[in-house]
Each structure stands twice: as C-alpha cells, then as structure tokens.
Image (cartoon, helix red, strand yellow):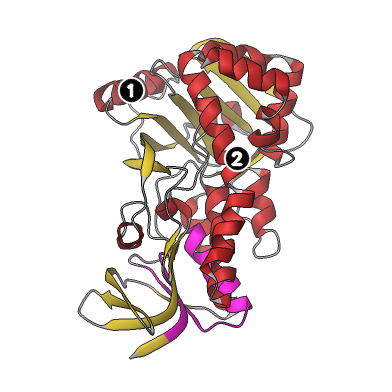
Amino acid sequence: MDAWDVVVVGAGPAGLSAGYEAARAGARTLVLERAEHPRYKTCGGGLIGTSLAAVRDRIEVPAEDEVNRMTFTMNGRHGFTRRYDRPLLAMVRRERFDDRLRAAAVAAGAQVRQRTPVRAVEQHPDGVRLRLAGGDEVAAGVVVGADGSSGVTARHVGVEYEQVDLGLELELPTPADQRERWRGRVLLDWGPLPGSYAWVFPKSDRLTVGVIASRGSGEATRRYLTDFVERLGLTGVEALQDSGHLTRCRTPASPLHRGRVLVAGDAAGLLEPWSREGISFALRSGALAGAAAAAGDPERYVAGVDAELAPEMRAGRRMLAAFSRHPGAFHAVVATPPGWRLFARFCLGETSFAPIVDRLPVRTALSLLS
C-alpha cells in the first residue's frame, strides 16, 4: 500500500501549512487535493499582519493591493474614513496565494497530488487508511484534515459547530472610472441584520464585494448584498464570480482530533467569530498540526490551539454578542482615535482581540452591550 508518515487532506492554507511543517520536520508527507491549483476560492482575501507573519519565511506574498485607508458605514450611512501611515492589509487572490503555498510545501519536501478526492477515513491499530475516489487507498501514520467544515475528516473527528454564517461574494471587474477611488481603500459596512457586515476589497483590476450574516436569513442576506452593490454604483457590472459559502465556528469543547486524525483550519471550525477572519487561523493551526503530526503527538496540537487560538476565539464570541445587539456602539468606538488605533493594530497583527477584551473597561462595556 502507498504509505506515508503524514497525509494531509486538503491543499488550502491550513493543509499546505501542515504539509510544509511536517515535511520540514523530516516526515514523509503527502498532500491530497480534490481540485487543481491555481483554483478560485470564495474568500475576501484580506491578509492581516498575523497572516503575513505566518508566511513571511515561506513565500513572497502575491499582493494585488495594499490598504492604508478604511471607510466605515452603517447600512450605507454615517460614513467616515481613516488613514494609516503604512499598509494595514495585503489583498490577495486566493488562487495565486494558495498556489504559492503549494510551491513552498513542495520545495520543503512534501508531495502534492491534485485531482485526488478522499472518500473515506478508517483508523486501524497500525495507522490510518484513506480511501480515494476510484477505490485506491493511502496509508498514513497520522492524518491532518484540512478539507473544510463539510469534508470527510471533520465528520470523522466529530467536529461540532456553534455558529454558522452565510457569506455571499461577487468578484467584479473594477470600472475604469472607479479604480482610483478604490485603490488602497477598504470599505466595511455594518449591516441591517444582527451580526452582519459587508465589504469591498480592492484587488488591482477587480473588486471583491461581499456580505455575511447568520445562516437562516438567506433571503435577507441576498437582499443586503443587492442593496449594497446598488449603493456602490456597481449594479449592472457583470460578475466574474458569483458564489456563496457557509462558515462554521466550533464549539469550545469540539474535538480537534480523533486518534491519529487531526483537523485544522475550517475543518476544525477555527476562525475569529466576530470578523469571521479565517486565513490566519488556517495558517497557524495548519502549522501547529503539521509539526504535531510529524512528531506523532496529537495532544501537542491540542495544547497549541488552546494556548494560541482559543483565547482569540473566546474574545471574538464576546465581541459578536455585543456587536449583534449594538453595532452603532462599535461604529462610534472605531470613529474615535483610540478605537481606530486598536483596530489598526489588530489589522497589523500587533495585537489580537483577546488582550483588548481582557481590559476591565472593555470587558465591562461588552457585558453591558450584550
């Protein structure tokens, strides 16, 4: 049988980070991907400083734009714009970003097999067997699942989710007369649905325009996107991509592994609950999982997630609870110089929401708002 020390299922940021770290640690590593790079992926593609730091030694980030201006509105009203003296976010197209990560994993020694869907996971006393489409099998000492929240590895491990959101996104060609308007600027709009918001992310000759809200309000979410595009003056612009996806956030007690099968990134439900930022969580959890898999120590991965990522998720839950009831308070805070500085520091990766929420005045305010 085709046998490996570590097999990674899924070649997104989490899976390719796992493959990179496992291969660097000396493990014979195979990454299985059902699609083929470069492939489109529904994603805002805004990299915060935490994400940039995670890949700094691996790749040159293929940034389409760098943002130092941010405009905030509340359902199209009460807008204001803030500037920073250096870039806050790097905007990437996921097909290019992920393909760079794939090349880095291969350079580190991992083998990547594309167009190879995994259909089933079976654990045995001597390891794990993966059944592929077509009936072939692959054996692994340890498996890292990074095939998304609806993938076979999340089902095998029994991941539980407490927050499910619907994201709708359009990739639009930037009209020539609007390119200067959007260059280096992001728009965030706090939406009319509880916990919802919309965004415009500039990427050279295209704009990523999207909205996100809690699942269960699909028609209202679609109407929010339609109204948002109309306010932007982009109605009638033919979309290059028109897609939707569900983001799922784990319960605090949800398992991160079952035996020798670990889950990372979206497959583990790891993302920041308020902003739904997931790329930094995918990169970091994938790296933690890859190193633990190479060492044959799943509990090392659990400890890493508990120490590094779980505090950020707890803080995000508290922020989402308050934001869902009182988005206007968040809008007002970001408009103040201290609020803007904190938001900018989060974007730069200089802080996370965890130490901010732990401050007594912030903790008290969030408790009152939620």
Residue highlighted by disc 2:
312
139 to 95, vertically: above or below: below
User: Which quadrant would residue 85 be assigned to in this image?
Assistant: top right
Q: Is residue 213 left or right of residue 86?
A: left
Q: Residue at x 53, y 49 (%)?
A: 279
Where are the magenta residues, as a range? 4-33
Q: Which mark is residue 226?
A: 1
The amino acid beneath tag 1 is Thr
Which of pointers 2 and 1 lies earlier in the amino acid sequence?
Answer: 1
The amino acid beneath tag 2 is Glu
Q: Residue at x 43, y 53 (%)?
A: 268
Q: Position of residue 141 (x, y in %)?
A: 44, 81
Q: Position of residue 8 (x, y in %)?
A: 44, 70
Query: Of 296 and 29, which appears nearest the observer?
Result: 296
Regarding mark 2 in the picture, which secondary structure is present there? helix
Q: Residue at x 46, y 19 (%)?
A: 324
